Amino acid sequence: MLTPFSQATPYASQRSATYAKHGMVAASQPQASQIGRDILAQGGNAVDAAIATAAALTVVEPTGCGIGGDAFALVWIANDNAGNGKLHGLNASGTAPAALTPQAVADAGFETMPLYGWTPVTVPGIPAAWAELSRRFGKLDFQTLLAPAIRLAREGFPVSPVIASLWQRAETTFREHLTEAATAGWFETFTPTGRAPRAGEWHRCEDQAQTLEAIAASHSESFYRGELAERIDAFSQETGGYLRAEDLADYQPEWVTPIAADYRGHKVWEIPPNGQGLVALMALRMLEGFQADSRDNPEVLHRQLEAMKLAFSDGQAYITQPEHMSHSVEALLDDAYTRERRALIGESALDPTPGTPQAGGTVYLATADSDGNMVSFIQSNYHGFGSGVVVPGTGIALQNRGHNFSLDPGHDNVLAPGKKTFHTIIPGFLTRDDGTPLGPFGVMGGFMQPQGHVQVVMNLIDFGLNPQAALDAPRWQWMGGKCIGIEHGYPAPLVRAMAERGHDMQIDHDPRGFGRGQMIIRDPDNGIYCGGTEPRTDASIAVL
C-alpha cells in the first residue's frame, strides 16, 4: 500500500521526508534545488523551475551532465486547454551524425564503439529540451531561467564532496585515456589549476557562462543554427570529428506519448523507446504476478532479481529508435508474453537470454508547483563528463552516447546515420490507475536506472515506505549473467539466501554505483507534497 506520509525511517540515513504545499524542488545539488525554488518564488511554474535547476546542474555537477548531453522529461500539466490534467513526454536525445557509419568506425580502427573521442559523440539534445519545455509550458522569460546558472558559472561555486570525488576519479581515467587533440580541452576547462578541484574548493568557468548567455539570448538557436553550432562544426572538422553544422541544424526534440504498466492499482509511466524505461515496465509486469509481502523475504528478492534479468535481456536485444525495433512496445508488454517470461522464474538463478514476443553519468530532478504541475526531468553526458571532447572556448563537454550503438548489422540497435541509440536515462512518473497524478520519481546511473525504478516503486507500493525511506533503502543491481551487486546494508542472511539460490552476490561498500534518485509524491486529497532525496550524493530539497 502506498503510504507517502508514513513517519517510519528504517534505513541508515535517517533523513526525514520533506513536506510542502506551494512548491518543491528535489535535486542532487543544494545550490541547484535552491535556484529552482527561487524561480517558483518569482512566479514560475514547475516547468520553469525544472529548466533553471537543470541549467544550474550543468555548472555545479559537470560529472553527470553538461550542455553537450541529452535529456528526457515527463511533464504533468494539471489543467490543459480542456481543463483536464495530462502527462506529456519529451524525448530530447540526439542522433548519430550523418558521417558516422559502421564503415567509418571500422576505418578508424574500432571493432566496437569506443567510449572516448569524437566517434561516440551524438547530437546534443539538452539545450533544445530547455527551449522546447519553456516554449510550450513555461511562464517566465527564458533568459530569466538561465540567469542563475550563468551567474554560478561566472562567479563560481564551492564544489560539493561527492562531486569532488567523482571529478577526481574522472581526471585519473582521462589522464590515462584522453590522448587526442580533440580531448585536450577537457583538462584546460575542468582542471584549470592542474588537477580536479577538491571538496570545498572554488570553481568557475567563464567559457560556460558565455555559452549559457548565448543559449539564453537565442532560445538555444545559437547552439543548433548559430555561432555555437559553427564553433562545434569547425572544431570537429579540425580534429577529425564526424559532427557537422548540418547535423545540429536538422535536430528537433520530439514530443512523445508516455508508456505505462499497471502495477497493483497504480500506473507507472516511462518515456517510450529509445529510452530503457520499457525495461522497468516489463519487470514490474512480471512481478505483479507474485506476492511481495516484505523487502526481507528471500523469495521476494529472488523474484525481483530474476524479473529484472529477463526484462533487461529483452531490452538490450530490442530497444532502439522505435521504427528500428523488431518487436514493438506493445508486444513486449503483452499479457501472454509477460506470463511466458514470468514462468521462467523458478527457485534458482538463471542466466537470461532474450525471448521472442509476437512480432508486432546523469542527473535527475523533480519539481512541483502550487497548481499541481509536476516535472520529472533527467539529463546526462552518459559516462561522467562524456566523450572527453570539449569545444575550445565554450565549456561544452560533448556526450559519448553513441557508445551504446552496436556494430552488429543484425542487431536492432546497429549504428546508422541519423539514428537514435538505446538510451539509459529515464524519468519516471506515478499515477493511480484512474489517472490521478501522484508524482515524479527517478534514479539516475546508467543501467542501474530501470533497476532503481523497480525498487523504489516496490518500496512505495508494496512495502509502504515514504519517498525518503524508499530512496534510503539499500539497493541491488544485476551486473550480467548471474552476478548481482548488492549494497552492504542488506541483511547478511538475505544475501546468503540469494547465494544459495545460485546468484553470484558481490557486496559493495561504495554506494556511488547504485544510482542517485529524487522523488515527489502529491496527496490527491489535500495537495500536500512529500519529497525524498538521495542519501548517496549531495542532494537536497527546497520548498516554497
Image (cartoon, helix red, strand yellow):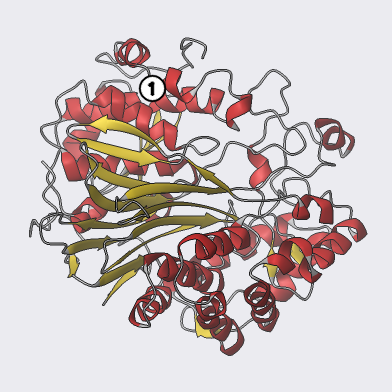
Q: Position of residue 29 (x, y in %)?
A: 41, 71
Image point 53% across, 70% down: which residue?
55
Is any atom of residue 499 visible in this view? no
Where is the C terminus found, in terms of image quarters? Answer: bottom left
Image point 60% across, 74% down: which residue?
196
Q: Is residue 239 left or right of residue 434?
A: right
Task: Identify which residue, 471 or 35, lies in the foreground.
Answer: 35
Q: Position of residue 190 (x, y in %)?
A: 65, 73
| Res 539 quadrant in image | bottom left
Task: Classify mark 1: helix, strand or loop.
Answer: loop
Q: Position of residue 523 (x, y in %)?
A: 15, 56
Q: Is residue 359 left or right of residue 83?
A: right
Q: Is residue 455 left or right of residue 119?
A: left
Task: Identify which residue, 466 or 107, lies in the foreground.
Answer: 466
What type is the residue that disc 1 sits on? Leu
Asked if 44 appears above or below 504 in the picture, the reply is below
Task: Identify which residue, 16 or 87, lies in the foreground.
Answer: 87
Image point 37% across, 27% down: which residue?
282
Is any atom of residue 443 visible in this view? yes
> Which residue is outermost to the left?
7
> Which residue is outermost to the right?
238
Q: Position of residue 17 (x, y in %)?
A: 18, 64
Asked if 70 appears above or below 52 in the picture, the reply is above
Asked if 542 appears above or below 365 in the picture, the reply is below
Where is the N terminus found, in terms of image quarters? Answer: top left
Q: Is residue 116 left or right of residue 17?
A: right
From the image, tell me which residue sits under label 1. Answer: 333
| Res 168 quadrant in image | bottom right
Q: Residues within 10 Å of mark 1 (few under 14, many from 20)?
A: many
